[in-house]
Image (cartoon, helix red, strand yellow):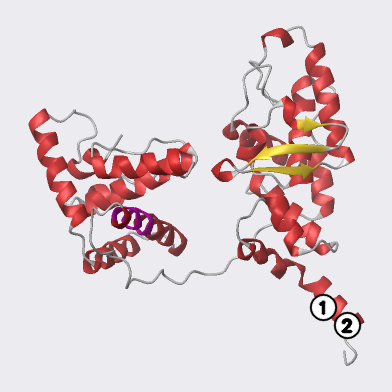
Amino acid sequence: MTQNPLIDEFLNYLKFERHFSPHTAKCYAADLAQFCAFLVGAKQQAGAGQRFTEGGAAPSAHQAVSGQTQQPPTASTAVMVEADLGHRLREVTPEQVKSFLAFLASQSYSKSTIARKLATLRSFYKFCVRREYVSTHPLTTIRTPKQEKSLPRFLEVEQINTLLSTPDASTLLGCRDRAMLEVLYSTGVRVSELVALNIEDVDFNARTIRVRGKGKKQRISPVGPTAMAALKRYLEMRRADARSASFDQQALFVNKHGQRISTRSVRRKLDKYLAECGLDPAISPHTLRHSFATHMLSNGADLRSVQELLGHQSLSTTQVYTHLTTPRLKAAYDEAHPRS
């Protein structure tokens, strides 16, 4: 926890009422800790110590404010810091928020990162207004910085085929890896959704999987025959393994120790196969999701269907992929328009 009751209450709201993932909640906590550090003038800590990554833990608000990351604070110091921080958070002005944004820009944060941190503050103060902890929202007059529009990166079909055929399916782990990559591309699921799959989520008769997405929302996703065959072969090899009785009997994909595989392990496996087949090492599991959406739209799928398959709440999130299918749209225009 952050040792600030107001922030702790907000984070609990995100986790238990909004059902945010633990990683997303950590990101919010890190953004708020950085803002707290800035408010009390600890700019060095705010600039250097708050670049939160997935592999690290979010710092506490007290650590961010006091700069103490090694020695625990005394009880009296903690009370003083907490009281001062709570007061500062409730009395934040638009000018202070603008100064914080200028500070982030001076630290060479990207516009997208600054926009994310600003979104964290908007959510936090919206929560505070609703709970009547503050009377006015200090960010109502502040605009989100205009961001550079970047198109999602995707793989060509030939590259996908090369990648998916790289794992050695004659071994249990290689068979598992091929099944994971096949499912990622066949369904467009997020890697977090992939590792959360259970064996019971797979319906071999209907050729579907039940996906638990963001906010504990569930959706049914169709699975192609190639991916389904890879899944079936993996499960057969897994059951035949001498250690299978000690494996996690619920998780669909398990690591070499028989426990549910992690998102980080999936990334490491992907990196391994990218190196083996000579593809760009910057490709991520999410690139397979982008490739799925792009290839679906390029081959005639409608935007609403792709939105549902991806589990996007807003159609505008899915619309970014339409920029990648311009050649198909132009061909359709040339064919259908009477004056083309």
Q: Mark 1 = which residue?
A: 330
Name the residue nearer the viewer: 111 or 253: 253
Q: Position of residue 53 (x, y in %)?
A: 44, 42
- Circles 1 and 2 in contact, beta carbons < 8 Å: yes
Q: Position of residue 138 (x, y in %)?
A: 27, 65
Q: Is residue 261 above or below residue 215?
A: above
Q: Position of residue 95 (x, y in %)?
A: 22, 69
Residue 175 appears in the picture as rendered: yes
Query: Residue 238 appears in which quarter of the rendering?
Result: top right
Q: Is residue 166 above or below residue 28?
A: above
Q: Which mark is residue 246?
A: none
Q: Is residue 215 left or right of residue 76?
A: right
Q: Which segment is the magenta one?
A: 122-128
Q: Mark 2 = which residue?
A: 334
Packing grade of label 1 (10 A; few <14, some 14-19, many >=20) is few
Q: Could you tell me which residue is drawn at 61 percent across and 31 percent down? A: 265
Q: Could you tell me which residue is drawn at 86 percent across and 25 percent down? A: 233
Q: Could you tell me which residue is drawn at 81 percent across and 63 percent down? A: 298
**Magenta-span inclusion, residue 174:** no
Q: Tag 1, which secondary structure?
A: helix
